[in-house]
Image (spheres, coloured by chain):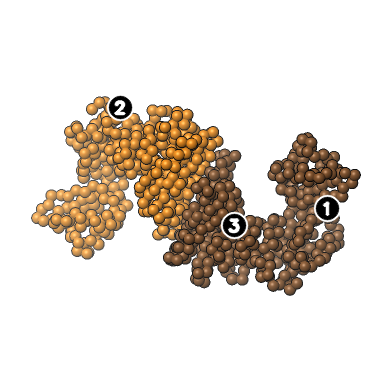
Chain colours: A orange, B brown
Amino acid sequence: MSILVMKFGGTSVANLDRIARAAKRVAREVANGHRVIVIVSAMSGRTNELVGWVEETAPLYDAREYDTVVSSGEQVTAGLMALRLQEMDICARSWLGWQVPVLTTSDHAAARITDIPTENILAKFDEDMQVAVVAGFQGLGADGRITTLGRGGSDTTAVAFAAAFDAVRCDIYTDVDGVYTTDPRLTDKARRLDRIAFEEMLELASLGAKVLQTRSVELAMRYKVRLRVLSSFEEYDPRAGTLVCDEEDIVEQNVVSGVAYQRDEAKMTLISVADRPGIAAAIFVPLAEAGVNVDMIVQNISEEGRTDMTFSCPVNQVARARKAMESARDAGAINFHDLVADTEVAKVSVVGIGMRSQSGVAAKMFRVLAQEGINIKVITTSEIKISVLIDRKYMELAVQALHDAFELEKPGSAA
Amino acid sequence: MSILVMKFGGTSVANLDRIARAAKRVAREVANGHRVIVIVSAMSGRTNELVGWVEETAPLYDAREYDTVVSSGEQVTAGLMALRLQEMDICARSWLGWQVPVLTTSDHAAARITDIPTENILAKFDEDMQVAVVAGFQGLGADGRITTLGRGGSDTTAVAFAAAFDAVRCDIYTDVDGVYTTDPRLTDKARRLDRIAFEEMLELASLGAKVLQTRSVELAMRYKVRLRVLSSFEEYDPRAGTLVCDEEDIVEQNVVSGVAYQRDEAKMTLISVADRPGIAAAIFVPLAEAGVNVDMIVQNISEEGRTDMTFSCPVNQVARARKAMESARDAGAINFHDLVADTEVAKVSVVGIGMRSQSGVAAKMFRVLAQEGINIKVITTSEIKISVLIDRKYMELAVQALHDAFELEKPGSAA
């Protein structure tokens, strides 16, 4: 029995018409001989409405009740999708998280899946069920109550089911038709990628390309789930979308796969910090505790026992970061002369697994930016990514220039 | 530990403000020293929206999926009510049907409660829980799936919990402030009853006084649950509402407790039916199978082996009844000369347990109607009820005249 997992996001099941369209796609895969596990999100807007009610009722809400309320959205879609499929003479039934059961930790509102026993659904597949419609985003905690996986968790549900059931593929239907070399709103040369490696997708997701939830990609990489991202609004095409897969499944590969960006960054510099072992922890532990998402970190050359420490964070966390640093200074944990915030910066990154075997990518990137007269403020690198902070006003220009320079509009050639 | 059950209907939890008001009532009972089981309906309008989606998706829907979708309404309210109570520093948590569990038959969309094990909730009461907020209307079928009890089922949930937990009382909060001697829209002399016997309430409920679901009253009578109907929109008054209770708990009792009516009735007469043993079954079995809700039945004196058979049903079922009778005649099961429908009639009834010991109520009723020039078309009686069919245009007049004649505006005197 070949099992296919198909996941439909909120915009793909936003109303009864869209549910009917999604059901047609499922029917086609059933006709292709698959048993299908369909993972559904809540109808779009519904989760926000439910969350709004919870927050208005109790600003500091009990996450267990939050889960009870919010999980109802996926429950409704699951039932409606099963009904729609039945109308098409397909034997389908809905499965709620506690019925499968999708076992999770009891970290309500941010639970992690611990196990998905397959017996119940496989037994129904062995009878006459053709499609199992599973409510995404939800599970059953060790406390016997409904849990949710955190926003975007339906992607994770889909990948976890694909792994547990050893599915041939996990198709994620969404409102974009795949993963692009960069944001098509920034340059019309942006090109949809046929394939992308897990590692690249992880970097792109964490860099703000909001196609897939990061955790779902991690999980797919770990369990070698072939993940396909495609649009639920386009005509059916078996070759559509972008396949997120193992590196070795990608034959033709550019050195650089994509250019990503994050617009609203801030660069903060602690001037003249007393340098000593443990100073990094003394700075970044309080920032983490204050909920500041520190991204890039650079420590300048130390002179006479003092150093400058620079880090970046989202621009709306600057006040929080400042407060945490001043509290730490007041408590005597750190010592610095000044804290300078530059709130007019953006991050631009080039990503590609080809970089591992090809040198000169960084040099080329810096040269392109220099030719455009763009000053680089901070640089960080990983094996498959180079990121720079630049003035925000040059962000679009930088993305376009890099996209051109690395010729991303052309399909990959064997590297 | 004294346990109180409080049930809030859809209009009483229609939005966050109303949920907050209901929560205040719960808090007052907690302060009075009760452990409280709160039964909540879906926010008003929500169930209709969900049912609408189901019916649009699949006109002949799978009732199991209907239950999955529709039960989500109560789930949302239960979570929100628990959150609201927590904000008032009350230790509350939500319970879904499958979590209690409320065990039911697997008759989806019309399930019956078979058992409510009390251990889980009692264990939490023994810890620190003060309020259990239970999603009404839903349970867990023997098939492991969510069931619902049919429309209005939250009343039944409330009474079943009161019986299972041996509650001191079951308070049903609704949008009316109690049970009246008749519909206040028909006469401003209508008076709220302080107490009414279960048997009377049953007759009134089945006569269209839509205060309580009939099944919930039957259940309350069987398990001697003291049931109070009161408004969630009035200021708190411990003596408010109407107590539905055992006959012996009613000290002061009028002979007649109320005058009920049903406006949209039809009277149908099968003329000259061949009279023989089994003829009633030959007529009424096909009507039942056709879904006709036959109410009153009268068989006229038989002459020469033929008889006239008259029955009443809701006016919108006349076509269905006619079709069923003509089919039965075509099939040779019955034989009649004509079927005459009078669609301009209404039913008026007087109800009172005092009738059992007091004769002359029927005579008085007929005299009052005669004095007003109202012709009686059909009469039926039970131990505690006398019903008549009359021309619809006289319905209001009849109700007012009977209310006056039996002096229902005056509180009961010891009969």
Residue A1 at x, y percent in the picture? 42, 32
In the rendered structure, the residue with mark 3 lies on which chain? Answer: B
The answer to whether dots 3 and 2 both sit on one chain is no
Residue positioned 51% across, 36% down in the render: A91
- In this orientation, which residue lies closer to the viewer: A212 or A329? A212
Left or right, B399 with respect to B162, comes to right
The answer to whether dots 2 and 1 both sit on one chain is no
Which label sits on residue A411?
2
> Which amino acid lies under the numbered mark 1 shown in the image of this protein?
Lys
> Which amino acid lies under the numbered mark 2 shown in the image of this protein?
Pro
Circle 3 Cα neighbour tier, 10 Å, few/some/many (<14 / 14–19 / ≥20): many
* Numbered disc 1: secondary structure: loop
For discs 3 and 2, the disc positioned in front in the rendered view = 3
Residue at mark 3: B156
In the rendered structure, the residue with mark 2 lies on which chain? Answer: A
Residue positioned 85% across, 46% down in the render: B307
The quadrant of the picture occupied by the C terminus of chain A is top left
- In this orientation, which residue lies closer to the viewer: B296 or B219? B219
Give residue B193's quadrant in the image: bottom right
Label located before the other in sequence (1 or 3): 3
Which label sits on residue B377?
1
* Numbered disc 3: secondary structure: helix
Residue positioned 81% across, 42% down in the render: B339
Distance from disc 3 to disc 2, alpha carbons, whole Å, reads 66 Å
